[in-house]
Amino acid sequence: MRNPPSPDRLRAAARESLQSALRAKADAYRREEFLRSFHRLSRSVIAAETPQAAAVVLKELERALRAERARAGHWTYDLSRHIALLVAHRAEQARALRLARAALRDARAHP
């Protein structure tokens, strides 16, 4: 007779499963295609390579994540969408940081 897995072991397995799903979705993230589904984001904001535009995109993704979290437990909750939003948010955070660093570098180079 087997002993049931410990809560720590279950937690670790769940964490690994989530990380695996996030890695798989990150590889499949298509920025423009995904962001076009947000009607509040114009094509010019999506295409812009500025820290300000990146902040607008992040704000919209954060709003969508809050809304998805609020649906947790409801029949309309979609785990795949939640994971996709999380992957997009992480990718856009990295992009915003890269753009902010580039803008700072440019400002220092051309005072």
Image (cartoon, grey):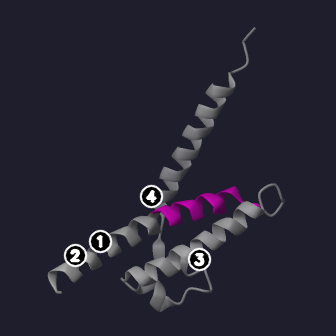
Magenta residues? 77-90
8 and 1: which one is in front? 8
Residue that appears at 47% across and 70% down: 30
Locate residue 5 relative to residue 54 in the image: left or right: right
| Callout 2 touching callout 1 (CB < 8 Å) | yes
Which residue is the site of mark 4? 27
* Alpha-carbon span between mark 3 and mark 4: 22 Å
Q: Is residue 47 above or below residue 90?
A: below
Task: State how many labels appear.
Answer: 4
Which residue is the site of mark 2? 105
Badge 1 density bin: few <14, some 14–19, many ≥20, Cα 10 Å: few
* Alpha-carbon span between mark 3 and mark 1: 22 Å
Which residue is the site of mark 1? 101
| Callout 3 touching callout 1 (CB < 8 Å) | no
Q: Main secondary structure of the magenta part?
A: helix
The disc labelled 1 sits on which kind of residue? Arg
Report whether residue 1 is seen. Answer: yes
- SS of the residue under disc 3: helix
* Alpha-carbon span between mark 4 and mark 2: 29 Å
Camera-nearest label, 4 or 2:
2
| Callout 3 touching callout 4 (CB < 8 Å) | no
* Alpha-carbon span between mark 3 and mark 2: 27 Å
* Alpha-carbon span between mark 2 and mark 1: 6 Å
Pointer 4 or 1: first along the chain: 4
The disc labelled 4 sits on which kind of residue? Asp
Report whether residue 34 is seen. Answer: no
Residue that appears at 49% across and 89% down: 43
